[in-house]
């Protein structure tokens, strides 16, 4: 059966219905995001933490941020993995459904920015599917693709550390999704101005 046909009368959760209405207007901000995941397979792996910042008028808005650890005890237990990361983290902790609802409310119709962002979006879409929601509708920009477009390099991908090294963005001792999102934001602002993106 065609996917769109089975979704035609689907009763989405209220937060998702609200999210869909936001696309009737143009986005007025960018949101840089980063996820930490249990692995690289959206069908089997889960998001462990999520960090994001808004970018408005060419500035990272520090107070407009999103940072949480997702409580994935069942996943970790089923796979024999340690939940030490969750216990030790000082970040806000939320069950996956609450974290996704809060995150979707945070991003609204903004343009998403990330490093290899298609992976982050696929992980978010897989999690949203577990909540009987649709897929994210936001436009997305990838700092790696932006850099390669700027330098006309098509045969190589660059890690976040590679790109930060090129643009002299320091690495923090604190390794977290929010720290990565902040570094991605700094990179994005540099690349955005060089590429003339408004």
Image (cartoon, rainbow, N blue to C red):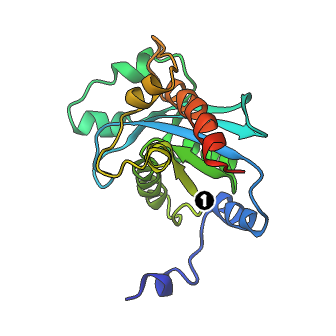
Q: Nearer the viewer, residue 15 or 183?
A: 183
Q: Is residue 106 left or right of residue 8?
A: right
Residue farthest front in this picture: 152
Q: Residue 196: x percent and y percent?
A: 67, 49
In depth, the one of 81 and 138 nearer the eye is: 138
The furthest residue to the left: 80
- Tell me residue 55's x, y (percent): 70, 38
Instruction: Give the camera-side residue of 69 and 139.
Output: 139
Question: What residue is rendered at 38% in x and 21% in y?
Answer: 85
Residue found 43% across the figure and 46% down from its top:
148
Give the crowd class for mark 1: few <14, some 14-19, many >=20 residues within 10 Å: some
- At which x and y percent is residue 70? 47, 35
Residue at the spot x=72%, y=51% of the render? Answer: 198
The answer to whether residue 178 is above or below residue 106 is: above
Q: Is residue 169 above or below residue 73?
A: above
In the image, is residue 7 above or below residue 30?
below
Give the vertical position of 44 relative to 138 (above or below).
above
Q: Quadrant of residue 102?
A: top right
Q: Position of residue 194 (x, y in %)?
A: 62, 41
Q: Is residue 42 left or right of residue 132?
A: left
The total of numbered circles placed on residues is 1
Q: Secondary structure at mark 1?
A: loop
Check the image and name the residue furthest to the top. 173
Q: Read off the residue under disc 1.
A: 138
At x 28%, y 40%, the residue is 39
Q: Quadrant of the N terminus?
A: bottom left
Q: From the viewer's perspective, tell me whether residue 18 is left or right of residue 125.
A: right
């Amino acid at each position: 059966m065609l996917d769109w046909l089975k979704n035609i009368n689907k009763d989405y959760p209220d937060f998702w219905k609200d999210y869909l209405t936001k696309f009737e207007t143009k986005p007025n901000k960018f949101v840089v995001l980063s996820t930490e995941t249990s692995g690289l397979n959206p069908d089997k792996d889960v998001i462990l933490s999520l960090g994001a910042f808004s970018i408005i008028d060419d500035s990272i808005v520090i107070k407009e941020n999103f940072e949480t650890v997702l409580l994935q005890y069942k996943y970790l237990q089923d796979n024999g993995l340690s939940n030490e990361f969750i216990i030790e983290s000082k970040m806000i902790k939320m069950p996956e459904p609450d974290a996704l609802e809060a995150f979707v409310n945070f991003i609204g119709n903004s343009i998403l920015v990330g490093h290899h962002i298609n992976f982050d979006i696929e992980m978010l879409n897989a999690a949203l599917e577990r909540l009987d929601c649709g897929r994210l509708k936001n436009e997305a920009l990838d700092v790696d693709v932006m850099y390669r477009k700027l330098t006309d390099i098509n045969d190589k991908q660059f890690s976040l550390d590679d790109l930060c090294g090129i643009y002299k963005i320091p690495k923090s001792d604190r390794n977290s999704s929010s720290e990565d999102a902040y570094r991605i934001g700094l990179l994005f602002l540099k690349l955005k101005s060089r590429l003339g993106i408004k």
